[in-house]
Structures are given as C-alpha cells and as structure tokens.
C-alpha cells in the first residue's frame, strides 16, 4: 500500500452569498441589542415625562462636539458601504481602504466621545439624568468598540484576499452591524441633543 498525500488550499473564510446563516444571526443580535437600547431609552423618556424640566441638567448638552461626531459616524457608514460595494465590484483596494477608513472614523468617534464625557458638568452619580446619559452612551461606545474590532478582522482578511465577489458574507454581516451602530447613535443624538430643546 502506498501513502498518498493530499494537498489542498486552506478553506476560505465565510460562506457563499450575502444571506448566509451568519447574516440572519446578526439580525437576531441587532434585534436583541435594539431591545436593550429601547429599554434604556424608555427609562430616559419615563423620567423626562414624569419630571419635565426638573429631570434635565441646568445646561443642556452642547452641539460643539456631538454634531461633528454625528457627521463622523454617518461618514463611516458611507465608507462601509463603499467597501462593500468595492467587494461586489471585484475591487479589493476599495474594500480594504473602505474598511480601513471606517475603522479610522470609528476610532475618531470614540476619542471625541471620550472628550465630550470629560467636559460634562454632571457625573454618573450626580442625578438620574447623568446616570442614564453615561449608561446609554457608554453602551453605545461599547458597541462602537466591538464594531471596530470586527472591522479590523475583516480588513486583515480582506488584505489577505479571503473574500471575492462570490464569497463575501462576513463583509456584509460586519457592515450590517456597523450601520446598526450608526442608526442607534442617530436615535441617541436626537434624544439627548435635540428633543430637550423642543420643549
């Protein structure tokens, strides 16, 4: 009997098509995390309705850092879309640079958010408003950090040529999560920076 060696290429990353099992799994994650933010925001609006202006701090959160930060996060959704589109068009360079730009914008968002936390006149322990503000934006920051880690792994795999126009579900799944993170921030920005000014 002779020994036969079988050589094969390493298995590719991800399954075929955009609607792979992981895509539906990510939808379940998004629904779960969406429910978490809904419960937290319910707490905020409950206090706001019960106590009115007394619930809010004397000085409302400013737009100085939050508005540019919102634009940065929206831009990161555009770069994530650009990366995914580049993948479907067979443009590896667009994929890699789009993902890298999304990571950079996500990190910049976190740095600015940290600076905004530092300049707040209230703390997590000062009142219910401060507790909810730091809890809700803190949970969002944690989701941004997880998104950056996901995108970093996707960028590495993309640079190594693991994805193509057929086998690309991980990129679509990662982009879907990132768009969710951005959508949550729009709700938080509206809640904390716009709604209180509407009376």
Image (cartoon, rainbow, N blue to C red):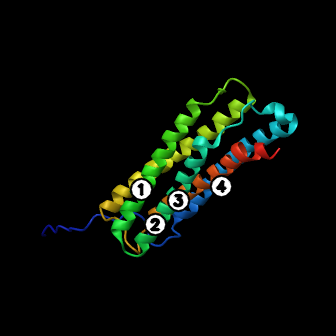
Residue pointed to by mark 1: 101
Give the SS element for disc 1: helix
User: Is disc 4 in contact with disc 3, using a CB cutoff of under 8 Å?
Assistant: no
Q: Which residue is mark 4?
A: 31
In the rendered image, the quadrant that contains the C terminus is top right
Name the residue nearer the viewer: 156 or 55.
Answer: 55
Image marks 4 and 2: residues in contact by CB distance under 8 Å: no
Q: Residues within 10 Å of mark 2 (few under 14, many from 20)?
A: some
Sequence-wise first label, 2 or 1: 2
Instruction: Give the foreground label among 4 and 2.
Output: 2
Q: Residue furthest front?
A: 64
**Mark 3: few/some/many CA within 10 Å (<14, 14-19, 20+):** many
> In the structure shown, which secondary structural element does the residue marked by tag 2 occupy?
helix
Q: Earlier in the sequence, mark 3 or mark 2?
A: 3
Q: Which residue is mark 2?
A: 82
| Residue 155 lies in quadrant | bottom left
Earlier residue among tags 4 and 3: 4
The disc, 4 or 2, on the residue closer to the chain's N-terminal end is 4
User: Which of the two labelled residues, at mark 3 and mark 1, occupies the earlier sequence position?
Assistant: 3
| Disc 2 to disc 1, C-alpha distance | 10 Å
Label 4 vs label 2: CA separation?
Answer: 25 Å
In this rendering, the label closer to the viewer, 1 or 4: 1
Q: Residue at x 57, y 36 (%)?
A: 116
Q: Contact (CB < 8 A) between labels 2 and 1?
A: yes
Please, what secondary structure does the residue beneath circle 4 have?
helix
From the viewer's perspective, is 138 left or right of 154? right
Q: Locate residue 100, reporting x and y percent.
A: 39, 55
Give the residue pinned by disc 3.
77
Q: Position of residue 107 (x, y in %)?
A: 46, 45
| First in sequence: mark 1 vs mark 4 | 4
């Amino acid at each position: 009997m002779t020994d036969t060696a079988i050589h094969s290429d390493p298995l590719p990353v991800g399954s075929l098509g955009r609607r792979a099992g992981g895509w539906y799994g990510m939808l379940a994650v998004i629904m779960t995390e969406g429910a978490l933010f809904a419960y937290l925001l319910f707490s905020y609006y409950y206090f706001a309705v019960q106590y009115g202006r007394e619930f809010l701090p004397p000085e409302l959160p400013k737009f100085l850092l939050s508005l540019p930060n919102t634009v940065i996060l929206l831009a990161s959704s555009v770069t994530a879309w650009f990366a995914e589109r580049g993948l479907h068009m067979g443009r590896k360079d667009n994929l890699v640079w789009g993902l890298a730009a999304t990571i950079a914008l996500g990190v910049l968002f976190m740095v600015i958010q940290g600076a905004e936390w530092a300049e707040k006149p209230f703390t997590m322990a000062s009142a219910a408003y401060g507790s909810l503000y730091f809890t809700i934006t803190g949970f969002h920051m944690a989701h941004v950090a997880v998104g950056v880690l996901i995108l970093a792994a996707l960028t590495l795999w993309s640079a190594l040529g693991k994805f193509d126009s057929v086998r690309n579900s991980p990129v679509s799944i990662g982009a879907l999560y990132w768009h969710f993170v951005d959508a949550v921030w729009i709700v938080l920005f509206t809640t904390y920076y716009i709604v209180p000014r509407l009376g």
